[in-house]
Image: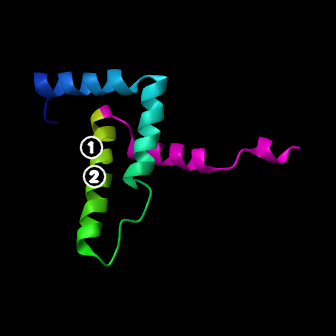
Amino acid sequence: MKEKSNDQVAVTQAYQRVFNTDDGELVLRDLAKASGFMANSFTTDPLEMAFNNGNRDLFIRIITTLGVDTLKMIELIKEENQPSEDIYDN
């Protein structure tokens, strides 16, 4: 496995300090939605599809740098999008 340089370690630690807060987690979830992380980026317009993929790739870079498991992130987003059972208990 390739070792990280001191600069890479410093960047990873900075990302973790920023996103390892309640506000950081809120922003990360918002970025997941805004980036289309869970959406199909296909469109018949190649420029629009490239734009969509660029947004998605940037979010994937952020979570990869943070060391977040992509599958875990998908599960968290799916759970967040499920209606709360409390809504139906009235």
**Labelled pair 1, 2 in contact (Cβ < 8 Å):** yes
> Who's the residue at 77% across and 45% down the image?
85
71 or 35, nearer to the observer? 35
Is label 1 in a helix, a strand or a loop? helix
Residue visible at 59% across and 46% down in the picture:
79
Q: Quadrant of residue 64?
A: top left
Q: Of the residues shown, which amino acid type is indicated by label 1?
A: Arg
Q: How many marks?
A: 2
Mark 1 sits on what residue?
A: 61
Magenta segment: does it hold 89?
A: yes
Determine the image quadrant of residue 4. top left
Relative to 5, say whether 53 is above or below.
below
Relative to 80, say whether 26 is above or below: above
- According to the picture, the residue beneath numbered tag 2 turns out to be 57
Residue 69 versus residue 89: which sits nearer the camera? Answer: 89
From the top left corner, tell me how far across and down residue 70 is, in percent: 39, 45
Going by the numbered disc 2, the residue's amino acid type is Asp
Name the dominant secondary structure of the magenta segment: helix
**The C terminus sits in image quarter:** top right
In percent of width and height, residue 48 lies at 28, 68
Q: Residue furthest bottom?
A: 44
Task: Report x, y in % for residue 39.
Answer: 43, 61
User: Residue drawn at (27%, 35%), measured in percent from left and top?
Assistant: 65
Q: Considering the numbered disc 2 on the image, is that residue within a helix, a strand or a loop?
A: helix
Q: Who's the residue at 41% across and 65% down the image?
A: 40
Left or right: residue 4 versus residue 74 is left
For the residue carrying disc 2, how many other residues have a C-alpha within 10 Å: few (<14), some (14-19), or many (20+)? some
What range is drawn magenta here?
A: 66-90
Above or below — where is 53 with respect to 58? below
